[in-house]
Image: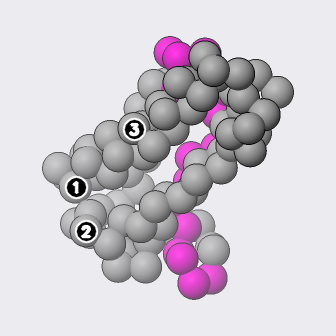
């Protein structure tokens, strides 16, 4: 989907993975996941990216989670211009933390 992005939008798209890393690090440092997810949404908006969602779900069942577990995954979807981008990452290294 990156081929649908202009050069400046491609630069902006780097914020998705950077934001996911920041959110994951915040959770690992003990911040509540819900606060970290809101931080991620706010961070994307600063770069004129329209987040659709940032969620934590079980990687096997895809059910929303209230607690970070070894099967937790963070999912993100956002629009840059007219292009919708999605990404996800494991939270296995994040400590157990409630939303």
The picture places residue 89, in percent across and down from the top left corner, at 46, 61
Residue 37, position in %: x, y?
45, 42
Residue neighbourhood size for the residue with mark 2, other residues' Cα within 10 Å, grouped as few (<14), some (14–19), many (≥20): some
Look at the numbered discs 2 and 3 and tell me whether their residues touch, using CB distance below 8 Å. Answer: no
Disc 2 secondary structure class: loop
Among the two numbered marks 2 and 3 on one chain, the one whose residue lies closer to the N terminus: 3
Q: Residues within 10 Å of mark 3 (few under 14, many from 20)?
A: some
Which residue is disc 2 drawn over? Answer: 93
Nearer to me, 62 or 12 = 12
Front disc: 1 or 3: 3
Residue at image mark 1: 28
Residue at point 53%, 58% (across, down): 88
Read off the magenta span: 44-61
Helix, strand or loop at label 3? It is helix
Which residue is identified by label 3? 18
Tell which circle, 1 or 2, labels the residue nearer the N-terminal end. Answer: 1
Residue 88 or 13: which is nearer the viewer? 13
């Amino acid at each position: 989907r990156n081929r649908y992005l202009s050069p400046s939008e491609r630069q902006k798209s780097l914020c998705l993975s950077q934001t996911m890393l920041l959110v994951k690090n915040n959770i690992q440092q003990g911040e509540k996941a819900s606060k970290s997810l809101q931080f991620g949404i706010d961070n994307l908006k600063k770069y004129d990216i329209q987040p659709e969602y940032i969620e934590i779900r079980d990687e096997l069942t895809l059910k929303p989670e209230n607690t970070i577990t070894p099967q937790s995954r963070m999912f993100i979807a956002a629009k840059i211009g007219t292009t919708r981008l999605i990404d996800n990452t494991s939270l296995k290294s994040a400590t157990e933390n409630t939303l």
